[in-house]
Image (cartoon, rainbow, N blue to C red):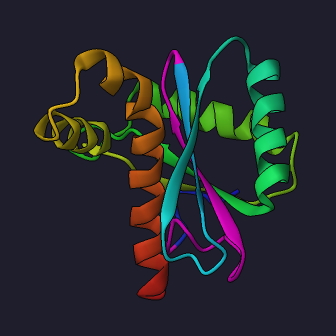
Amino acid sequence: MPTQNDQSPLAALPPVGKLMGLDLGTRTIGVAVSDGLRLAATPIETIRRVKFTADAERLLVLIAENAAVGIVIGLPLNMDGSEGPRVQSTRAFARNLSQKTDLPIAFWDERLSTAAVTRTLIEADMSRQKRSAVVDKLAAAYILQGALDRLRRKV
């Protein structure tokens, strides 16, 4: 798992293969996956969080079904770039998940990802109820797409 001192947050990821993106919320986990060429991120599921073991089991199934070779987790930094309790919780989740899979895990700055996705859905005139059903997996796709775009520019 990468450390804070890595020159690139994506350095631990293998150079080829599908990546899975996660947007960790307190009640849900948004999940997205890239295509094999790493051109586009596609939202695939929103997992209702129960407890870590059940959440991890579902993630491992999705990883296997999608043949993912690495995981990108959104890191909820504060607007000033500092780390707060949500970052600590995200890092703890990643540490626990890394005990259940050998896949490399990288973090990607997720500041404003949910806000950007929500704004887009509002502009599309989607109802609040429909937005809440898709916002987390779309945020995961937004996070993963940012990482994919960076990888294409060479980390």
Image-quadrant location for residue 90: top right
* Residue drawn 54% across the image and 22% down it: 28
| Residue 51, image x, y percentages | 73, 13
Is residue 135 toward the left or the right of residue 66 in the image? left
* Residue drawn 72% across the image and 75% down it: 17
Name the residue nearer the viewer: 25 or 36: 36
| Residue 108, image x, y percentages | 46, 55
| Residue 138, image x, y percentages | 41, 43
Q: Is residue 5 in sight in this rendering?
A: yes
Instruction: Count the numbered circles shown.
Output: 0
Measured along the vertical axis of the image, is residue 108 above or below residue 57?
below
Name the residue nearer the viewer: 37 or 151: 37
Quadrant for the N terminus in the image: bottom right
| Residue 10, image x, y percentages | 55, 69
Name the residue nearer the viewer: 58 or 12: 58
Q: Specify start and end residues of the magenta stretch as a single range.
A: 7-27
Q: Residue furthest bottom?
A: 154
| Most common SS among magenta residues | loop
